[in-house]
Image: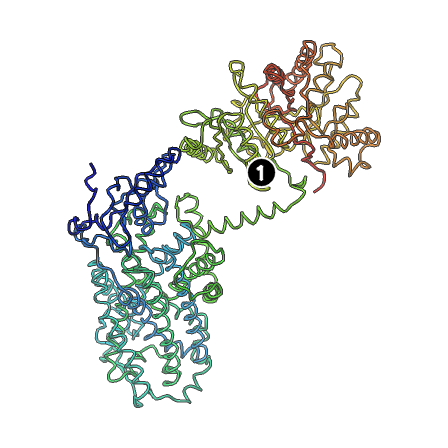
Amino acid sequence: SNPKEGRTPKDARPGSTVSACESIQIRSMAAADVDTAVLDEATDIVSTLPSPDGGPPSPILQSTSMSDLFGGRSGSAQVGVSTRLGWLSDTTQRPEDATKADPSDAVLVDTPCIAQDGAASGKEPRKLATILGVFVPCLQNILGVILFLRLSNIVGWMGISMALLTVGLCCSTTFFTSLSLSAIATNGAIKGGGPYYLISRALGPEFGGSVGLCFYLGTTVAASMYILGAAETLLVGFPELQICGIEDQSCSGTDCTVNMRIYAYIVLVLCTGAVLAGVKYISAVSPIFLIPVLVSVLCIWIGILVGPKFDVCEEVPQCLSSANSTESCVTVDPKLSSTNMGDNYGVDDEFNKDGEYDFRYSLALFFPSVTGIMAGSNRSGDLKDAQRSIPIGTICATLATSVLYLLTAFLYGAVADRSTLVNETFILSAAIALPHKMIVQVGIVLSTLGAALQSLTGAPRLLQAISNDNLIPILKPFRGKGEPRRALLLSFIICAGCIAGGNLNVVAPIITMFFLLCYMFVNLACLLQDLLKEPNWRPRFKFYHPITALLGLFLCLLIMFLTNPGFAAGAIIVVLLLYAYIQYRKVEAQWGDGLRGLRYHRARSALESLEKLKDGPHIKNWRPQVLVFCKTGTQDYHVTQPKMLTLLSQLKGGRGLCIMGTIVEGSLAENSEEQARCEKSLRQQRDAAKIEGFTQVIMARDVGHGINSLIQTAGLGALIPNTVMVAWPHHWQGDPRKPERIAALLETALAYNMALIVVKGSENIPAAHTRVQAPIDIWWVVHDGGLQMLLTTVLRKSRVWSHSALRIFCVLQQDEDPDELQKTIENFIYRTRIEAEVKCVILDEGAGGKTGASFKACQNALCRQNSNVGSTSSWQLNASIVNSSISSLPGDTKAVLKSNNSSQMQSRAKSPRHSIYSTESLLGDESKNLGASEVPDAAEIEQLLVSTRILNRIVVKYSSKSAMVMTNLPMPERQVDGHTSELYMKQVDLLTSNLKLVLLVHGQPNADVVTMYS
């Protein structure tokens, strides 16, 4: 039935991808069905397989693929190796669904069974090799206008020694940068965009976009510099080309800025038209522009070594004078002269125009001559093998030009006196050339034109790559594929604006800053990747080191601030502003950049250091680390009580950990997609509520097990939640499971030594845009370590609650002194630096004449399972404060506090009560010794409910108009049957009735959270 069955390689059609490439296919067998008969059958099958030396294939080969052996019974689809190789070699992002990859897109490299008929799919564009793709463009950009027009002036201004230092400093910077560039370029597939692609994938889209834009501007402005150099060469070398009548009478040489602008605009239009024809034509004519440059350099060296002494007279037309021209003559001795070397060795202020052309100016002027090292990487998308071509071509071009610059600077100082070197009315490099100066003049024009073409070719492609990544919306018109014509038009406009200045010396320092920024971040990217030791950092280029990257980074910063500190600071500020803007837009890029690796490294180090703290967080560092239980819908997974997220965001003033957790009933092995959808929905709701925290979804067979799992697994290391927050369930009377679940949650959290916050009336939580004026009331019945006061302090840091006053209510019995208690509490509040109003309330106000026994029963219920309560006094202060400052407290309260402190220390030695819901796994055999509480009789139940009603009346009387009421959370009795849970729910409902928003708080066992010390 299988049409492929029994086919041999001889049966395949010519050019077919089947036959020899066809994989061995075996039907998978379930492990549960394997028995002796099956094993015997498998043995027979294996015996029929072809031998290693060839032979006909076994007829048992079926239509199921080899990958079925690894699919398992879970239904997870596995794809073959060949299916994934094409994607792995072509992208750095994770696909949405790896199982939907198209097998037809696969490319299996270096395998003899690949189909060779590529003509059917059409011919790909011709790619460039190392010479034409990298070496020639770099050489053209580096050997440009500065070498021929300004290097001799720099030697005259600064002397041989400082000129060599200037050249060496610039060349060292580009050499170290080329090493870093080579390492990054050989660490993965390189697409279009050149340095932007490298920086963005190494440091992230924020730095990539900001630095890429600066590099684009630098490359574009560099094109205007090269074009101005071509125009200056034409006007100085061929004075007859000057247009008469448009300059003033004193115009000569480089002072004729109007003529220079006119010719520069003509050259710009011609270069832009050539670039519009396409990059393949620019690459084809590149050698035509480079060969005359190399010939010109050779002619200069021949003239220096063997040329005779002569006088150079340059004609300088003066169009507005009666005479046709004047002559300016200088004497040049091309032979190497020790006299010239001695006279030109140091700086001579006489020829330095009052220090205007100092070392910093020369450094800024010369650096653009070595900035062509990125020309090859700018065209990375057009290279056959970018990982091979970029290192070889870039480093070779950098070393060759560095040696050439150093030797030429030395020879310039040896063949002419200083007055000749600083003279700008003629071109010294052309004057000393043999056999004729015309060769050098033509070579200068062609070199500047070639460099301008390379810049106008690379800059638009760089802008298009940035635009295609959708980092900055304003760049949307420049998106696209193929020739970036719109980006070229923008580059044309920027070049035209720079040419309007008409002065080469003004444009060159601007270029320096932009290129140095890019080089600095290339070195930073290499240094960061190497220090982090990411597993994916495996560059093929091995001749680099973190020290070389650090040196390159340091030299870039040094030159930036040496040349122009103000401009350097401004450029860095621009980069940071662009970084902040791109980060604000929250660009979703899955590039796995180095900064993410740095964040991971720092987070891991911080967690490890926290883990080494033996005693846990100090009382001064305690803050609510909240795990909020979110009930979600079964279809859309939206939180059923979304105001809980609003309250969670308002609690972020404590800068603590926030985890949104939920439980989904089911089997993870069978419903993993449901769990992933739920977590994705939670994250979206977290971001919509502007909560800085985490999400965690537990899939368990029932809610009870999910509660235990979530409480035990939330967090990592020492960064774990210490507080559980949950909303009080609505309409719990209709579902008998709800009381059991809420009781199990509270018991489990307490057993795990966590504080509790139960929110009653979550629908009344104020929205984030409101400003609450009503007060927050604390009804402090039993000591909870000060958690209620700490929570109100955190809440009042948010804008919503910042205008709310804090009131603390004390409930007293008839035999207690309200004045004494109020003084004690006010002293305690003052020393803990909490602004609050303290009020004492007599129990009889709500008891209606009943005795204090009812309140005692209510108080005991609130104190139940609270290990901090060890005496019958209704007020117990922070134990750490009592221990440290008992002498500073009011004298008449010392005895009471000592008694309280003693009882607290005894109670802390006792183990807290634990939940009967699966917490035995936490406690081991000790939990078996904890017996359940006896079932309360009807009288005890009635007394408890009456006491709760009395307390509720008092709270409602004073706090009915408060924005929030916070009081102690009663804990449920140990479970005997469902009736106990229902009784507990009724008690809490009764305690909080007729109140809009109530936070029921239970502190961590044996933990104080406020202190009077700084």
The residue to which callout 1 is attached is: 720
Quadrant of the image for the C terminus?
top right
Number of numbered labels in the structure image: 1
Q: Name the image quarter holding the N terminus.
A: top left
Percent coordinates x, y for residue 471 in the rendering = 37, 47
Residue at 57% in and 20% down: 740
Task: Looking at the picture, tell me which residue is in the foreground, 290 or 701.
Answer: 701
Query: Relative to residue 554, is residue 72 depicted above or below?
Result: above
Placement of 1010 over or under 360, stated as above or below: above
Image side of residue 801 versus residue 779, left or right = left
Q: What element carries label 1?
A: loop
**Residue 633 or residue 554, whichever sits in front:** 633
229 relative to 717 in the view: left or right: left
Q: Residues within 10 Å of mark 1 (few under 14, many from 20)?
A: some
Nearest the camera: 707 or 17?
A: 17
Can residue 988 be seen here? The reply is yes
Residue at position x 48%, y 63% in the image = 546
